[in-house]
Image (cartoon, coloured by chain):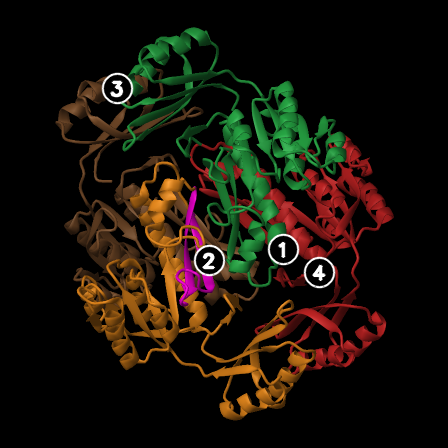
Chain colours: A red, B brown, C green, D orange
Amino acid sequence: MMETVIKIACRDEKGLVHKITGVLFAKLLNVTQTNEFVDEPKDRFFMRVSFSGSTDLKSLTQEIEAVLPSDAKVEVIPPAKKRVLVCVTKEHHCLGDLLIKSQFEDMPFSIVGVVGNHAVLAPLCAQFSIPFTHVPAEGLTREAHEARLRLIIDAANPDLIVLAKYMRILTPEFASAYLGKMINIHHSFLPAFVGANPYQQAFQRGVKIIGATAHFVTDDLDEGPIICQDVVSVNHSYDAKQMSKAGKEVEKSVLAKALQLVLEDRVFIHENKTILFD
Amino acid sequence: MMETVIKIACRDEKGLVHKITGVLFAKLLNVTQTNEFVDEPKDRFFMRVSFSGSTDLKSLTQEIEAVLPSDAKVEVIPPAKKRVLVCVTKEHHCLGDLLIKSQFEDMPFSIVGVVGNHAVLAPLCAQFSIPFTHVPAEGLTREAHEARLRLIIDAANPDLIVLAKYMRILTPEFASAYLGKMINIHHSFLPAFVGANPYQQAFQRGVKIIGATAHFVTDDLDEGPIICQDVVSVNHSYDAKQMSKAGKEVEKSVLAKALQLVLEDRVFIHENKTILFD
Amino acid sequence: MMETVIKIACRDEKGLVHKITGVLFAKLLNVTQTNEFVDEPKDRFFMRVSFSGSTDLKSLTQEIEAVLPSDAKVEVIPPAKKRVLVCVTKEHHCLGDLLIKSQFEDMPFSIVGVVGNHAVLAPLCAQFSIPFTHVPAEGLTREAHEARLRLIIDAANPDLIVLAKYMRILTPEFASAYLGKMINIHHSFLPAFVGANPYQQAFQRGVKIIGATAHFVTDDLDEGPIICQDVVSVNHSYDAKQMSKAGKEVEKSVLAKALQLVLEDRVFIHENKTILFD
Amino acid sequence: MMETVIKIACRDEKGLVHKITGVLFAKLLNVTQTNEFVDEPKDRFFMRVSFSGSTDLKSLTQEIEAVLPSDAKVEVIPPAKKRVLVCVTKEHHCLGDLLIKSQFEDMPFSIVGVVGNHAVLAPLCAQFSIPFTHVPAEGLTREAHEARLRLIIDAANPDLIVLAKYMRILTPEFASAYLGKMINIHHSFLPAFVGANPYQQAFQRGVKIIGATAHFVTDDLDEGPIICQDVVSVNHSYDAKQMSKAGKEVEKSVLAKALQLVLEDRVFIHENKTILFD
């Protein structure tokens, strides 16, 4: 998993794969995986290449850019654990799973800190020796609360922000500040049951399957690019509370799966969608 | 599967199961399965009992009613294949599956006829020697078209009407006329993507899972009690057409599963939800 | 969830449900759920009843027994968290999930201790203030090692023993000593890939789906009554290590689901199978 | 879907993708999809390329072969419906699904004929105007029966043979004669329950999930390269017959999915495994 990754996105044209692999071949890099996708209607080309071994990344980037259209976006990402900051409210299930995965290095990341608008999860973080910061929202405007949040986030300067059941609505400004760097787990099968109390909505509607959705956060609430979704069956005997309990397991696994993909640089954001090279 | 079924719904009170099973025990019926469910907030009791062997059904019904609250609804349903009328438009996948299941008696039903607002599926019905009636909508008001439809349906007097990708919006009057007797397969994971072109909506939204929903038809479009749902994974390489193709297999299996449950009298409608005793 | 549960298993005969519910009705107990199943070929009757409120459990048991065949096994289980002892080797994923669920009371149980034949998971237990006992197997016969294990288990006197990736083969004597009280998570979709290295076996065979199985431990290795199973898709790009990684998530969720059912007294062991009233 | 497909398999070496795409770029072909996979332990390279538009396929093949290692296997497959022969015994569910899919061109294939060792499915084929040949096995040695089968198969000269619940054991000679051209649907989740009566075996074992497996037929019974697998949940109330009924739906969908992949030339056979570029 821990290899150097090249991510390329640009206008599509003939010969891109040939030209890009030509650069890699000239350097005799040991390519371990390549994936390409062309969005034909949008005329966009996406490619992910991973390789082991070392080379000068700056010149590699320049040589690849030299063979691509001028609008090309090229990222060359050396192997490294990503630094993740987690935002929570009161629910422990996603955070607990992430804390264990971080401690045992189940995924290539380390949790640099946890921020909560309530303090109930501080002891759990302490058990894992992870700094927890309580940023209460009481008596603050949304903007004022987010300003405090941003101070902590920017001080930690994480590669990625994970909203692990962070139950506050974000301002467009906050979302925009971390565009493409912040993922959220939504406790419903989007676009079903957007907004508050999705399990109560699901119960009211009498659905037979509930789900969870991990997505990038944008300024449009619950409308960000979807990374992963999964579902679980329920039946008439479930009340909203039992649906919520069943849903927690799915939320946990969907968030973990999405995070794994993002940590391995397998996710491209393409307008309001994602391209996954898994 | 082909046993006599008793369906009971009434206000909940203590001792109902004892009293009902007392009637069955007195008759020494060979009970093969019993299911009960109590909706406590709504204070409603639901029970399904199946038994083999024969008894006088009229007196059985009366004796059960005698031990129940006055609001009790008791159905005693002798073993018999149900007579099903199918409504279609142009898509063949659900109809084809039903025609084969009917011919080979995979489920306890027989298709008494197929009605289409287009004629393209007439030859398929002919292959199975099932009468097909073409009721074109061209140049007719919705009401006028449904009037012709109702003549055919009422002449066939089916136990159940299956909308197998019948792509016309129904008037509340039409839906009400067959309340609890008409099921529809909707090509999305309700309540996601209600209305037209759900696969186009799903593609636009960039979801990673699509689904299908079988539900009873009510006067509220796409809002009827859900019987079954299922999903299938898709990815960024699927366009709306491919999603539709993938969805067809799920539509087919979800409709078949829901129909099986209804044919076996395992489904109770409870307000806008269903209770399934499977 | 925390209600008094009655579990009944006996030879089948007509009128059992009527007689049993008669006892409950006479006491005007507030029955919240009842489930019955009859294994007709084996002529066995199984019933689970849950009720809220209090009554004299000893007389309740006796009155129920009085209306049942002489071979009847009646358990009346008052609401209480079950005391669980966990056995581990080196893998942390199942243990970590259980420690969090125990601490936050996600399920009605508390972990009274963890025993490991290796010490690597001692620090994790310490983080949760759960006593960990290291029982190394080096230089001991299987019998001698199990003798030490049994001293610890019997001192803790748990209601249930969970083998959370405990990677040692048990003697029939050890298994028999805790029959019906010990559940294991097997890292394959039994009966596929019994024995050692199931993921290596799965990789060699080139399967497209892998799974996990939670089962009661019997003296017949990997042949105990299955409680829960689930699967996850893999493809040609997975090596045995990646299959193992993917499998861990399923192992975790399958074990949790099975444990939940057992903790809620919803599982009957019937010969080499289980009956689940979920 | 209907594009020209290039399938390449050879010893891995650096620069293969660059060299292959160089040939395609020189011809300015409109490449619609490319997939590559390297089995590093086995040092094997696999690539699938699809393109629209026309070019001289013979010279294309030669030019690609010219840049590859000497052991390379290159297939250039022009867009065309594949001609499929189906073998059956008595069960109709898979055949019925294939007949409908063939008639409505749901997949790029046409059924050129059906062969059965029993005659019960002849009328169904007649409904679809597909020739059915009855080849009874009574009083014949396995070899003699297969000899007659081979006469019919070879006369039809199909691109692909589908064993759609053909319930006879094949001789290694027969299997070898159609290696890589014959797929079978096995009614279990291989390698669980190999051999006869898998549903009876599954019932005896008390599994909670059953499945189906589509695989290429080799001379090693039930051990051929797996293409697709899927599962469905069952519970304690299912007897072997009900498991079989539930399994039929999965058999049908798994076979259809596998066939679709093979028809689109997305499947590579690699020793006893498959590589799927879907």
- Res B104 quadrant in image: bottom left
Q: Are marks 4 and 3 on the same chain?
A: no
Residue farthest to the left, as pictured: B56
- Placement of A140 over or under D214, stated as above or below: above
- Residue that label 1 marks: C242
- Magenta span includes D181: no
- Residue that label 4 marks: A265
Task: Single out the mark in the foreground, 4 or 3.
Answer: 3
Q: Out of B250 and D57, give the one closest to the viewer.
A: D57
- Residue C15 is marked as 3
Task: Single out the mark in the foreground, 1 or 3.
Answer: 1
Write down the chain letter for disc 1. C
Task: Give left or right: position of A161 versus A228.
Answer: right
**Residue at the (15%, 28%) spot, across then down:** B57
- Placement of A262 over or under A170, stated as above or below: below
User: How far separated are the C-alphas under marks 1 and 4?
Assistant: 17 Å
Q: Are marks 4 and 2 on the same chain?
A: no
Tell me where residue C179 appears, x and y as whole percent.
Answer: 50, 27
Q: Can residue A138 be seen by looking at this rendering?
A: no
Asked if the residues shown at circle 1 and circle 4 are in contact, with their CB atoms under 8 angstroms apart, the answer is no
Tell me where residue C197 appears, x and y as whole percent.
Answer: 58, 50
Task: Give left or right: position of A237 versus C233.
Answer: left
- Res C87 quadrant in image: top right
- Residue that label 2 marks: B198
Q: Out of A10 and B218, give the one closest to the viewer.
A: A10
